[in-house]
Image (tube, helix red, strand yellow):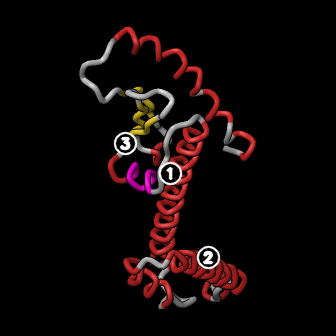
Amino acid sequence: LLDGLVPDPAQAAREHQQQRQRLEHLQHLASEVAALGAAEHAELLQRAAACQPDSDPQQLAELTERCNAILTAHLQQQAALARRQAVLQGLASLGYEVREGMATAWAQTGRVVLRKPATPGYGLAVGGKAVYGRLQPRAVAPHAHRASQRDRARHPPRCGQSQRPQARPAPQGG
């Protein structure tokens, strides 16, 4: 009966070590969130900094989850920006006019239209959400009075061109 009343020191040491590890992990994630420099995360960072080894494990788990969500969203935004830039660089290599700020405009409007001086009267509209990895290129003609025969003649070369920019990011792991 007396042995049942005495706490197990090994179990208490294991729980204390796990709590320390959770706290260290939270502090590591909080420092990564702080490196993003966003003012909207100040309250979260203050709560994480106030945590101690004897803090509630549920609170540590909740703060860790919030930090992970912020970092995941940031990584997704960076990946989407990289996708947009890779697509625009690929189209620039095909002769389309790509200007500074097009990646930003694409992110804001969900679509960007590019001209190709070699084919006047036609352009390429690239739309879609790069965050989800789905992009849709479409041939566009700004003139309402265009010849549909000419449109059909322009279609096969555009389809063949789409494979060249797709091959560019492959050696870099894209």
Residues tagged 3 and 1 counted as in contact (Cβ below 8 A):
no
- Residue most extreme to the left: 144
| Quadrant position of the N terminus in the picture | bottom right
Q: Main secondary structure of the magenta part?
A: helix
Q: Is residue 47 above or below residue 129?
A: below
- Look at mark 3 in the image and give the residue it sits on: 111
Residue range corresponding to the magenta coloring: 101-107
Q: Is residue 103 magenta?
A: yes
Residues tagged 2 and 3 counted as in contact (Cβ below 8 A):
no
Helix, strand or loop at disc 1? helix
**Of callouts 3 and 1, which one flags the residue occurring earlier in the amino acid sequence?**
1
Mark linked to residue 80:
1
**Of callouts 1 and 2, which one flags the residue occurring earlier in the amino acid sequence?**
2
Considering depth in this image, is 155 or 45 the residue closer to the camera?
155
Label 3 or label 1, whichever lies nearer to me, is: 3
Q: CA distance from mark 2 to mark 3?
A: 40 Å
**Of callouts 2 and 3, which one flags the residue occurring earlier in the amino acid sequence?**
2
| In the image: residue 171, left or right of residue 125 | right
Label 2 or label 3, whichever lies nearer to me, is: 3
Q: Is residue 128 above or below residue 60?
A: above
Helix, strand or loop at disc 2? helix
Q: Residue at x 53, y 44 (%)?
A: 88
Q: Residue at x 40, y 35 (%)?
A: 125
Please rate how many residues cluster around mark 1, counting C-alpha atoms within 10 Å: few if below 14, some from 14 to 19, many from 20.
some
